């Protein structure tokens, strides 16, 4: 035998699957949904990857009473290949909402609400609502993995911000201008953190992306429509508009609007036009809550109770106080937040030790609940008069 002749290496079926999955993930890192699907199809990878997604999530999605269509599987497959944690989060959000909308929730005035009935009353199907929950984060495909998987905690971010402010160059000037704009006061090196805290502004809202990304990652931003001057939060929040665009282009207009408004819909224009929040209200004449509220609460609840690259899971008391902060800042309606918190408290068995350990949290929770109940009572008395 000639020693120079090539040796054929037999590749097992499992190895072939892994090779194809690796190539599919490389394609998914491109950042443009349509290109991802087209390239997967052209390289004859799409069908196999969809089967893998069904294998991973099919039973859970079926148990959530959602009959996924091929387009749903295609979109979820793109999410899975791009970022498995995001796909898991999307499925968990679906699971949370598939149960929550069938619960009987308690309103601040003591009345009850069944969300599924109200959703249908607004001419939105349960299928459309659950699809919006499942695919709400597809737009994260546009966000570089280096940002999604960044391990910095909020404490670390303050340190990064401090270093960037005290450095020389354009970044420092840019950050100082951001701080002045967001805090509503001239930049002051001694009080900037207090100024930002008083306006509930986090470091990622003022830090340009190049304070954490190496030069090779900065070049990838331009392909996704960003610049190095964009703040971390601007890049992360771009996923909402991208979710709207992808879902609308996929033939899901209702889901597109819901998904694009699940973070801060009260203050955002969708698709360049003023979007009527009233058009998305569930039982507006009766309950005054919104479907975007419901998706927001499920989205945030799962994000906080689940581990991330920069944190571990939060105890339920901490999760509920964050939801209260969102309600008080106008990111989500207070009435729906009240109903959500009452539901979560009834489902989670809280020990006496937890009540003692997180006493301040439970005090804040009880104050919020009691305030909503008193306001509902005042409103009722005013209407009765």
Image (cartoon, helix red, strand yellow):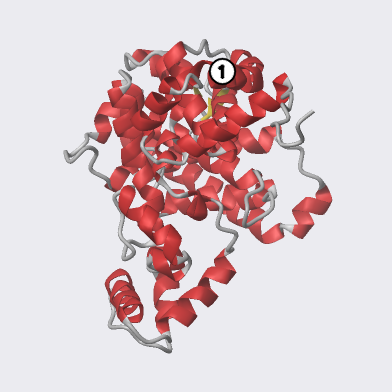
The residue lying at 71 percent from left, 36 percent from top is 4
Would residue 189 be found to the left or right of residue 110 on screen? left
The image quadrant where one finds the N terminus is top right
Residue 140 location, quadrant: top left
Q: Which residue is mark 1?
A: 48
Q: Is residue 228 in sight in this rendering?
A: yes
In this view, 10 is above or below 334: above
122 or 308: nearer the viewer: 308
Residue 291 location, quadrant: top left
351 or 174: nearer the viewer: 174
Q: Give how far across and how far down residue 191 sits, in percent.
A: 42, 85
In this view, 350 is above or below 171: above
Q: Give how far across and how far down residue 186 sits, in percent.
A: 28, 83
289 or 207: nearer the viewer: 207
User: How many neighbours does mark 1 have within 10 angstroms: few (below 14), some (14-19), or many (20 or more)?
Assistant: some
Q: Is residue 288 in sight in this rendering?
A: no
The residue lying at 32 percent from left, 13 percent from top is 123
């Amino acid at each position: 035998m000639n020693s120079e002749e090539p040796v054929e290496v037999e590749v097992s079926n499992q190895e072939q699957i892994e090779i194809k999955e690796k190539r599919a993930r490389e394609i998914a890192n491109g950042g443009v949904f349509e290109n991802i699907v087209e390239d997967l199809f052209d390289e004859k990878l799409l069908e196999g990857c969809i089967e893998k997604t069904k294998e991973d999530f099919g039973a859970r999605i079926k148990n959530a009473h959602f009959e996924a269509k091929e387009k749903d599987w295609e979109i979820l497959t793109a999410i899975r290949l791009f970022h498995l944690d995001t796909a898991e989060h999307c499925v968990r959000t679906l699971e949370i909402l598939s149960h929550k909308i069938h619960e009987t929730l308690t309103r601040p005035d003591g009345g009850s609400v069944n969300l599924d009935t109200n959703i249908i009353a607004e001419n939105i199907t349960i299928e459309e609502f659950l699809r919006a929950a499942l695919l709400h984060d597809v737009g994260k495909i546009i966000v570089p993995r280096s940002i999604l998987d960044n391990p910095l905690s909020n404490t670390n971010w303050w340190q990064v911000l401090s270093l960037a402010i005290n450095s020389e160059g354009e970044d420092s000037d840019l950050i100082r201008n951001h701080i002045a704009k967001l805090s509503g006061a001239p930049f002051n090196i001694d009080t900037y953190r207090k100024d930002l805290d008083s306006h509930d502004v986090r470091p990622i809202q003022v830090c340009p992306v190049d304070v954490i990304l190496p030069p090779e990652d900065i070049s990838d931003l331009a392909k996704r429509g960003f610049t190095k001057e964009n703040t971390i939060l601007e890049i992360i929040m771009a996923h909402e508009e991208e979710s709207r665009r992808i879902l609308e282009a996929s033939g899901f207009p209702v889901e597109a609007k819901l998904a694009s408004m699940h973070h801060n819909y009260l203050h955002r224009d969708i698709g360049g036009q003023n979007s009527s929040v009233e058009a998305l209200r569930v039982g507006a004449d009766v309950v005054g809550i919104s479907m975007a509220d419901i998706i927001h609460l499920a989205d945030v609840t799962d994000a906080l109770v689940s581990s991330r690259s920069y944190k571990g899971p939060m105890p339920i008391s901490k999760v509920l106080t964050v939801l209260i902060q969102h309600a008080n800042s106008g990111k989500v309606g207070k009435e729906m937040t009240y109903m959500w918190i009452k539901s979560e408290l009834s489902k989670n068995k809280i020990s006496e030790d937890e009540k003692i350990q997180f006493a301040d949290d439970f005090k804040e929770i009880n104050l919020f609940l009691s305030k909503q109940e008193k306001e509902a009572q005042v409103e009722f008395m005013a209407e009765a008069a």
